[in-house]
């Protein structure tokens, strides 16, 4: 039988999951087994197949979880079994990544492998700190050096004289623990003690921290700031450019941690927007989107869609769920041909658009009251309206329409259920003081999170609370919570804008 086993040695980049290459992601998506290190962001693993086996082989600088020889043997064994293996390493496999060693063993055993280059932290981490490794008229060369080697060793493999005087920018990896020796050696060998230097910890992550110093003061300053690995130490005049080029740490929400309580399936849009603004995000879904208790009313409505003059959607979820059910009936968007369509909110309208339906009515703001007001003049006596929405939603909209004489059928297309699987993670983060703000994107996120927290809900008093709109804010207040931030426009973007404004004012 042909053996199709192969190992892809993939550089996973410096941390920010967006810095994995497209080729790396493709290989990851194909792999049967993922063998990964500590520095690979866990979210990168999310691009692998759900059924792929995931093997953690560690590698914090001093306590290796699995010995290098064992990792090499493991890769060989898996490839020999015919598996497609993604060997994920931080940064690039060839920059102090021992990728060469792993491949040499595979070559010895006649097993196939490929390298997929990654973005090395040596260049990307300074870049995220606003420090270019070369710059015209400032630095024409750079060197990447291991800081792991004991520089006091009599036969150091490092040419300190050459580095100190012959290379413009010096980039030390794994150097925090040896900083005293590294800086002393460079000064001894002719690099001026007042040369600018910087230490960047957890580069490209929301936790990134940069200390700017000089070669002479670096050791003391790093001690004082108690900066621990992983970090990169950069020496050279390019460090000065950070004053103008520091772009990442100056993002509006940089350094802040937000809790996103939306359902897992919907969380990503808010998470992504917050991360774009530099924030760290902890997803703690307080709700789960699930089937309605009874599909019969929806099925009945689908069978008789032509009788409705208007079909109204109140959420993107409602639209997705409706179309899923429609497909299950063997139907598609043409089923709506006799109807007019109304949507609350631009996200709902956009979702309809994705199914090829342009909403006839999208009220300027996002409350049910506004849709009612906009719709009433368009209704004729006897018109039937179908309201497709979550089970147990407010009755403002159907009540107002009925009062105006319309026949309204309300059908549940989905239901939100309480879900707070990683509540313990939230409680721990609140207790550690690492959370800055908890965001609420609907009333049910508020009530469900409070239920889940139970007697520990007092922990929310010490953080900023943000509500997507007045209804959610009202629910908060009823429960004794007082949101300091409320979106002016009741959308995800509106919420993010309000948060940016809030934190800009606090600075
Ligand atoms: N192959 C990797 C480097 C492995 S050596 C690469 O190409 O990036 C591990 C060292 O890399 C750490 O000790 C630290 O010095 C550096 N490093 C890796 N990721 C880092 C990050 N996000 N922030 C700061 N330093 C990082």
Image (spheres, rainbow, N blue to C red):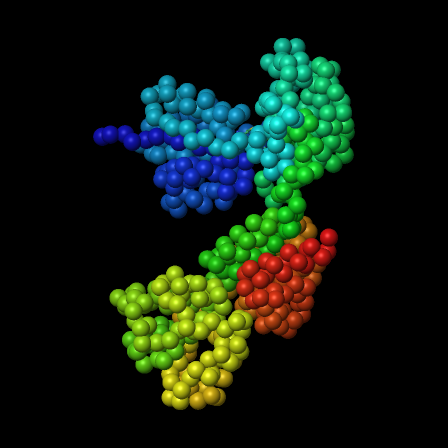
Compared across the picture, whether 9 is left or right of 170 comes to left
User: Does 388 sit left or right of 282 as displayed?
Assistant: left
Residue found at x 38% / y 85% = 383
Name the residue nearer the viewer: 322 or 41. Answer: 322
Residue at horizontal 45 percent and vertical 22 percent from the top: 100
Residue found farthest to the front: 137
The answer to which image quadrant residue 32 occupies is: top left
Query: Can residue 378 be seen by looking at this rendering?
Result: yes
Quarter holding the N terminus?
top left
Give the image location of residue 470, x and y in percent: 60, 71
Kindly identify the residue that appears in the image at 73 percent across and 53 percent down: 507
**Number of disc labels:** 0
- Reply above or below: 188 against 450: above
Residue that extends furthest to the left in the rendered view of this protein? 1
Q: Position of residue 494 (x, y in %)?
A: 58, 62
Q: Quadrant of residue 195?
A: top right
Dividing the image into four quarters, tell me where ligand 1 lies: top right
Would you identify the image quadrant in which residue 160 lies? top right
Residue 250 in the image, given as x and y percentages of width and height:
66, 45
Q: Is residue 175 above or below residue 253?
A: above
Report the residue at 34% width, 26% height from top: 112
Q: Is 71 rendered above or below residue 506?
A: above
Can residue 420 be seen in the rendering of this structure?
Answer: no
Question: In the orientation shown, which residue stands out farthest toward the top?
Answer: 155
Above-or-below relation of 368 to 197: below
Picture coordinates of residue 83 (x, y %)? 34, 34
């Amino acid at each position: 039988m042909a053996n199709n086993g192969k190992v892809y040695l993939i550089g996973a980049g410096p941390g920010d999951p967006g810095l994995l290459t497209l080729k790396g992601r493709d290989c990851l998506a194909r792999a049967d087994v993922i063998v990964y290190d500590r520095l690979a962001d866990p979210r990168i693993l999310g691009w692998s197949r759900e059924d792929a086996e995931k093997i953690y082989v560690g590698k914090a600088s001093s306590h290796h979880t699995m010995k290098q020889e064992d990792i090499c043997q493991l890769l060989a064994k898996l490839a020999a079994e015919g598996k497609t293996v993604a060997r994920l390493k931080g940064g690039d496999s060839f920059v102090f990544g021992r990728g060469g060693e792993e491949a040499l063993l595979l070559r010895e055993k006649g097993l196939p492998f490929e390298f997929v280059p990654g973005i090395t932290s040596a260049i990307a981490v300074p870049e995220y700190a606003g420090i270019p490794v070369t710059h015209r008229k400032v630095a024409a060369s750079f060197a990447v050096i291991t800081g792991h080697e004991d520089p006091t060793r009599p036969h150091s493999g490092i040419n300190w004289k050459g580095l100190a005087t012959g290379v413009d920018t010096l980039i030390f990896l794994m150097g925090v623990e040896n900083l005293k020796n590294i800086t002393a050696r460079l000064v001894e060998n002719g690099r001026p003690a007042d040369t600018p230097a910087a230490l960047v910890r957890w580069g490209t992550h929301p936790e990134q921290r940069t200390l700017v110093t000089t070669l002479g003061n670096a050791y003391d300053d790093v001690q004082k700031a108690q900066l621990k690995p992983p970090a990169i130490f950069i020496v050279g005049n390019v460090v000065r450019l950070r004053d103008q080029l520091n772009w990442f740490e100056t993002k509006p929400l940089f350094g802040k941690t937000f809790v996103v309580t939306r359902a897992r399936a919907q969380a990503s849009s808010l998470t992504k927007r917050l991360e774009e603004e530099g924030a760290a995000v902890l997803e703690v879904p307080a709700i789960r989107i699930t089937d309605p208790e009874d599909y019969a009313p929806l099925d009945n409505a689908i069978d008789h869609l032509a009788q409705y003059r208007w079909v109204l959607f109140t959420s993107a979820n409602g639209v997705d769920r409706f179309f899923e059910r429609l497909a299950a009936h063997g139907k598609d968007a043409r089923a709506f041909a006799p109807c007019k369509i109304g949507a609350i909110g631009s996200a709902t309208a956009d979702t309809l658009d994705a199914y090829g339906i342009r909403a006839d009515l999208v009220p300027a703001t996002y409350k049910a009251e506004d849709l009612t007001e906009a719709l009433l003049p368009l209704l004729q006596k006897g018109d039937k309206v179908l309201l497709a929405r979550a089970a147990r939603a407010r009755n403002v909209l159907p009540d107002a329409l009925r009062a105006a004489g319309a026949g309204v059928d309300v059908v549940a297309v989905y239901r939100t259920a309480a879900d707070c699987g990683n509540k313990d993670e939230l409680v721990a983060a609140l207790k550690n003081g690492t959370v800055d703000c908890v965001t609420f994107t609907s009333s049910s996120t508020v009530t469900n999170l409070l239920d889940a927290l139970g007697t520990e809900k007092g922990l929310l008093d010490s953080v900023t609370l943000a509500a997507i709109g007045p209804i959610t804010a009202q629910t908060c207040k009823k429960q004794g919570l007082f949101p300091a931030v409320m979106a002016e426009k009741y959308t995800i973007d509106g919420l993010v804008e309000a948060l940016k404004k809030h934190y800009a004012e606090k600075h």
